[in-house]
């Protein structure tokens, strides 16, 4: 009887030990660092690994000693459902385990601590109708003073619309689609392409796209990038913090990513600065 009791106790302890290891496991996958990403949306990410999300993912995979693997899907409606929450059809677990860049207020997944903050920015070409503008608040006066009508390209989504409205600029707007039917289309790049081509004079886009594309076009056109500050009086928020995202209830995995962010903040910031993203400290 004593031997049987000892055997059962040993079995229970073994089961408890195994479950404890599984519960404390800080990795979502023991072989791959599986990233959910957009295949076409620079400067964030693309299939060729050219975005800042790609570079930070490479850094984290190296730190964790895991092989980097992507699940690509256009980052629009259905992105989280088809990536982070989608079970893999060819292996155990999910198709991917982390999104490298979401607003910190994102509600469809658990977000890490923010790792950078940027804002919307006014972008225009130097040498054009808006050379007198050194601050976004000067845009209306410059537009009124111009002999030729100033065209400001603006998408139909986002806080930039509010800023334009409250600053009396609606009559200067040339509308663009914020989410075109073609998933390969990059709305911010389209706007900046049209500034370079002379089709419009200015636009307001998020700082990631403003800074990155200004750098890409520096040998062709000098683009002025002026970050826009929040306006508490008019209740217009134009600066946003960004985090990474994992599935809800995966506390240990989220803590691991938070530690990686903290321990590698200098390297992350170096990547963001290299992509010319205007950061708010």
Image: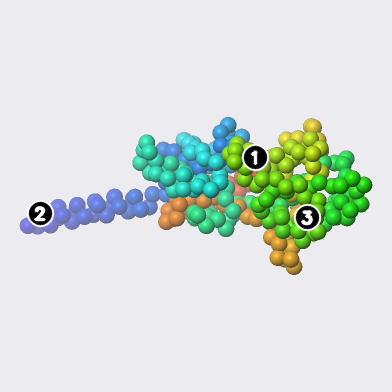
Q: Is residue 74 visible?
A: yes
Give the alpha-carbon distance from disc 3 to disc 2, as whole Å.
85 Å
Query: In the picture, residue 165 is in which quadrant?
Result: bottom right
Horizontal side of 126 relative to 35 (left or right) equals: right
Give the alpha-carbon distance from disc 1 to disc 2, as whole Å.
70 Å
Find residue 210 and report its horizontal and vertical position in percent: 72, 44
Horizontal side of 228 relative to 35 (left or right) equals: right
Residue in the image at 66% along x and 52% along y: 157
Of tags 3 and 2, the one toward the viewer is: 3
Q: Disc 3 or 1, which lies upstream in sequence? A: 3
Q: Is residue 203 visible?
A: no
Q: Secondary structure at mark 3?
A: helix
Of tags 1 and 2, the one toward the viewer is: 1
Q: Secondary structure at mark 1?
A: loop
Residue labelled with disc 3: 170
Find residue 245 and report its horizontal and vertical position in percent: 51, 51
Residue labelled with disc 1: 186
Find residue 155 and report its horizontal and vertical position in percent: 69, 48
Rendered position, 41 above or below 118: above
Residue labelled with disc 2: 3
Quadrant the C terminus occupies: bottom right
Q: Secondary structure at mark 2?
A: helix
Q: Are marks 3 and 1 in contact (CB under 8 Å)?
A: no
Q: Disc 1 or 2, which lies upstream in sequence? A: 2
Find residue 163 and report its horizontal and vertical position in percent: 74, 57
Horizontal side of 165 relative to 142 (left or right) equals: left
Rendered position, 43 above or below 233: above
């Amino acid at each position: 009887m004593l031997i049987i009791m000892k055997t059962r106790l040993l079995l229970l302890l073994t089961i408890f030990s195994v479950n404890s290891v599984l519960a404390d496991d800080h990795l979502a996958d023991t072989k791959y660092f599986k990233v959910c990403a957009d295949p076409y949306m620079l400067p964030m990410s693309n299939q060729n690994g050219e975005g800042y999300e790609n570079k930070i993912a490479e850094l984290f995979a190296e730190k964790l000693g895991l092989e980097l693997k992507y699940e690509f899907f256009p980052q629009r409606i259905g992105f989280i459902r088809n990536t982070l929450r989608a079970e893999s059809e060819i292996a155990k677990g999910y198709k991917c385990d982390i999104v490298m860049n979401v607003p910190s207020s994102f509600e469809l997944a658990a977000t890490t601590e923010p790792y950078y903050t940027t804002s919307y920015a006014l972008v225009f070409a130097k040498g054009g109708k808006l050379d007198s503008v050194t601050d976004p608040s000067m845009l209306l006066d410059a537009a009124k003073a111009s002999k030729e009508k100033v065209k400001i390209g603006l998408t139909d989504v986002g806080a930039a619309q509010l800023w334009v409205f409250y600053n009396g600029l609606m009559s200067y707007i040339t509308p663009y689609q914020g989410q075109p039917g073609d998933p390969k289309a990059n709305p911010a790049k389209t706007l900046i392409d049209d500034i370079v081509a002379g089709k419009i004079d200015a636009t307001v886009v998020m700082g990631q796209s403003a800074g990155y594309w200004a750098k890409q076009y520096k040998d062709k056109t000098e683009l002025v990038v002026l970050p826009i500050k929040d306006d508490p009086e008019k209740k217009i928020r134009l600066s946003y913090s960004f985090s990474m995202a994992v599935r809800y209830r995966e506390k240990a995995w989220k803590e691991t990513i938070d530690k990686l962010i903290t321990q590698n903040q200098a390297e992350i910031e170096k990547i963001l600065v290299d992509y010319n993203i205007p950061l708010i400290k």
